[in-house]
Image: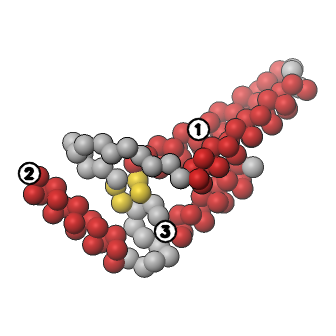
């Protein structure tokens, strides 16, 4: 079983390295049942989280000046959309390894859309 896992990992590594440098196929970080490695957080992940914190702060300021039914509804809808976007991004990054230029460009575009 262990030899099969190592063979699969070597095959995935060769496939990952053989793709174009600008666009690479995302690869699964951990196989089912394999030991879980400690995730590595890079500076862009922290900056992306900080952008969400700033957006939540601005939404709070918006709610501070519109504490009526329409303001609460507007805040709730925007906050739920923003929270769902953040949770999807974190879940994807925890499961899939994407280290190519195309995915980094998409990440930067996401950050600009949230900001």
Q: Left or right: where does residue 96 sit relative to residue 89?
A: left
For image coordinates 25% across by 43% down, the residue present is 35
For image coordinates 10% across by 57% down, the residue present is 3
Q: Earlier in the sequence, mark 2 or mark 1?
A: 2
Q: Residues within 10 Å of mark 2 (few under 14, many from 20)?
A: few
Percent across and percent down for residue 56 are: 73, 35
Q: Earlier in the sequence, mark 2 or mark 3?
A: 2
Q: CA distance from mark 2 to mark 3?
A: 31 Å
Which color mode does the image show?
secondary structure
For image coordinates 22% across by 68% down, the residue present is 11
The local secondary structure at tag 3 comes to: loop
Q: CA distance from mark 3 to mark 1?
A: 24 Å
Q: Residues within 10 Å of mark 3 (few under 14, many from 20)?
A: some
The local secondary structure at tag 1 comes to: helix
Instruction: Look at discs 2 and 1 and give the one toward the viewer.
Output: 2
Closest to the observer, 42 or 100: 42
Residue 84 - label: 1
Asked whether the residues under the numbered discs 3 and 1 touch, taking CB atoms below 8 Å apart as contact, a structural biologist would say no
For image coordinates 36% across by 60% down, the residue present is 27
Closest to the observer, 78 or 46: 46
Asked whether the viewer can see residue 45, the reply is yes
Instruction: Look at discs 3 and 1 and give the one toward the viewer.
Output: 3
Residue 100 - label: 3
Task: Tell me which corner region of the image, top left, top right, bottom left or bottom right, holds residue 7.
Answer: bottom left
Asked whether the residues under the numbered discs 2 and 1 touch, taking CB atoms below 8 Å apart as contact, a structural biologist would say no
Task: Tell me which corner region of the image, top left, top right, bottom left or bottom right, holds residue 19.
Answer: bottom left
Q: How many marks?
A: 3
Q: Left or right: where does residue 18 sit relative to residue 71?
A: left
Q: In the rendered view, tell whether residue 42 sits above or below residue 80.
A: below
Question: Disc 2 designates what residue?
Answer: 1
Q: CA distance from mark 2 to mark 1?
A: 38 Å
């Amino acid at each position: 079983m262990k030899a099969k896992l190592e063979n699969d990992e070597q095959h995935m590594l060769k496939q990952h390295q053989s793709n174009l440098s600008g666009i690479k196929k995302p690869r699964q970080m951990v196989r089912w049942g394999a030991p879980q490695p400690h995730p590595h957080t890079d500076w862009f992940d922290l900056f992306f989280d900080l952008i969400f914190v700033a957006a939540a702060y601005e939404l709070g300021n918006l709610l501070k000046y519109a504490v009526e039914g329409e303001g609460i509804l507007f805040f709730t809808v925007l906050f739920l959309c923003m929270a769902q976007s953040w949770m999807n991004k974190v879940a994807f990054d925890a499961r899939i390894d994407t280290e190519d230029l195309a995915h980094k460009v998409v990440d930067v575009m996401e950050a600009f859309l949230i900001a």
